[in-house]
Every structure is written in C-alpha cells, then in structure tokens.
Image: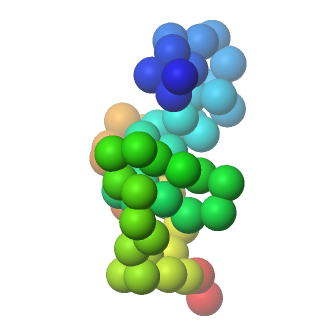
Amino acid sequence: GLRRLLELEHPLARLIARCAIARPESRGAHLRSDHPERDSALDLHHGVLRGDQPVAWETWR
C-alpha cells in the first residue's frame, strides 16, 4: 500500500505517498477506507511539501 511506497528509492513515489496519506478524505480515484467521505473544506486545495515539514494544504489561485 501507500506506506510501502514511502520506503522506495524513488523520490516522486515517496512525495505522492506522503500527500496521499496526509489527505484526510476520499476524492475521485483517491479512496480511503479510514476516510470514506469527501471533505468540502479541501475543495480547491492542493498539498504542498517542503522538505520534511508536514503537508501544507494551499488554495488554488
């Protein structure tokens, strides 16, 4: 699963997995059994990673 991707040597796979794990909802093809509902508070937001900091949810402009 996603946790296994975090162990890969591929930086892009790790970034995608970090954002997917941080997203507390299901949306489109991103389905989570622990968060089955869509969160409208995250509409028009995307995850931004900066180094080892937690994912920041920023508004699309």
Considering every residue shown, the one lying at the far bottom of the view is 61
* Residue under the point 45% across and 22% down: 3
Q: On the image, which quarter does residue 10 sit in? A: top right
* Residue under the point 60% across and 88% down: 61
Q: On the image, which quarter does residue 8 sit in? A: top right
Front position in the image: 38 or 59: 38
Q: Is residue 60 above or below residue 38?
A: below
Q: Is residue 49 above or below residue 43?
A: above
Front position in the image: 29 or 18: 29
Question: Residue 18 appears at what percent x and percent y?
Answer: 46, 38
Front position in the image: 51 or 9: 9
Question: Residue 2 appears at what percent x and percent y?
Answer: 51, 27
* Residue under the point 55% across and 82% down: 44
Q: Is residue 36 left or right of residue 59?
A: left
Q: Is residue 49 above or below residue 41?
A: above
The structure's colour scheme is: rainbow
Question: Residue 33 appears at what percent x and percent y?
Answer: 41, 44
Front position in the image: 8 or 40: 40
Q: Is residue 22 above or below residue 57?
A: above
Res 58 visible: no
Res 32 visible: yes
Question: Residue 48 appears at what percent x and percent y?
Answer: 49, 57
User: What is the total number of numbered labels drawn onto the structure image?
Assistant: 0
